[in-house]
Amino acid sequence: MRRERLTTAPSPDSRHDFLVELRGEPAAGTRLTVRLVPDRLVLEPAGFAAYLTELDGTAGLEALAMAALDDLNNELVPRWVEVAAERDAPLPHRVVIEDRQPNWDNPRLLDRLRPL
């Protein structure tokens, strides 16, 4: 059910690499940031917002980040994806995970990224 919320659209041009970044709060005090390089599909922001309401924002950050990564990989099959989950209380805690398609690399694009 949760994955169904991740609505997609065809990429405007799958020949080029471009970066997409979306942020939201699945629960108060829990932030989720997704950065990805789409392949054939792009994630619609409204679908991402609906998806956040289905995530268990009270789960451990490691589980939250892994669930989001698995869902994005399943629905979008991006060339590259990075998921960051974080909370400030009771202590600052941040989890960052990334994945990429085999043989995909674009160091010039990834070098431009600001640290999360």
Image (tube, rainbow, N blue to C red):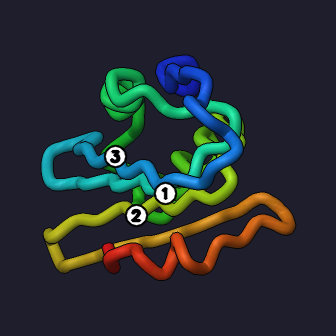
Measuring from the top left, give residue 109's x and y in whole percent. Answer: 52, 71
Residue at coordinates 40% horizontally, 63% vertically from top-left? Answer: 84
Q: Secondary structure at mark 1?
A: helix
Q: Is residue 6 visible?
A: yes
Sequence order check, earlier mark of 3 and 2 = 3
Amino acid type indicated by mark 2: Ala
Q: CA distance from mark 2 to mark 1?
A: 6 Å
Query: Does residue 37 appear to the left or right of 39 in the view shown?
Result: left
Circle 1 Cα neighbour tier, 10 Å, few/some/many (<14 / 14–19 / ≥20): many
Residue at coordinates 41% horizontally, 60% vertically from top-left? Answer: 60
Sequence order check, earlier mark of 3 and 1 = 3
- Circles 2 and 1, Cβ within 8 Å, touching? The answer is yes
Q: Secondary structure at mark 3?
A: strand
Q: Secondary structure at mark 2?
A: strand
Amino acid type indicated by mark 3: Leu
Query: Does residue 40 appear to the left or right of 21 in the view shown?
Result: right
Circle 2 Cα neighbour tier, 10 Å, few/some/many (<14 / 14–19 / ≥20): many
Q: Which residue is mark 3?
A: 22
Measuring from the top left, give residue 34's x and y in whole percent. Answer: 42, 53
Amino acid type indicated by mark 1: Ala
Q: Which residue is mark 2?
A: 84
Circle 3 Cα neighbour tier, 10 Å, few/some/many (<14 / 14–19 / ≥20): some
In the displayed image of the protein, which residue is found farthest to the right?
A: 103
Q: CA distance from mark 3 to mark 2?
A: 11 Å
Measuring from the top left, give residue 42's x and y in whole percent. Answer: 54, 33
Q: Which is more foreground, mark 2 or mark 1?
A: 2
Asked if 49 appears above or below 82 in the picture, the reply is above
Q: Quadrant of the N terminus?
A: top right
Frontmost residue, 63 versus 15 = 15
Frontmost residue, 100 versus 70 = 100
Q: Which residue is mark 1?
A: 65
Measuring from the top left, give residue 73's x and y in whole percent. Answer: 67, 44
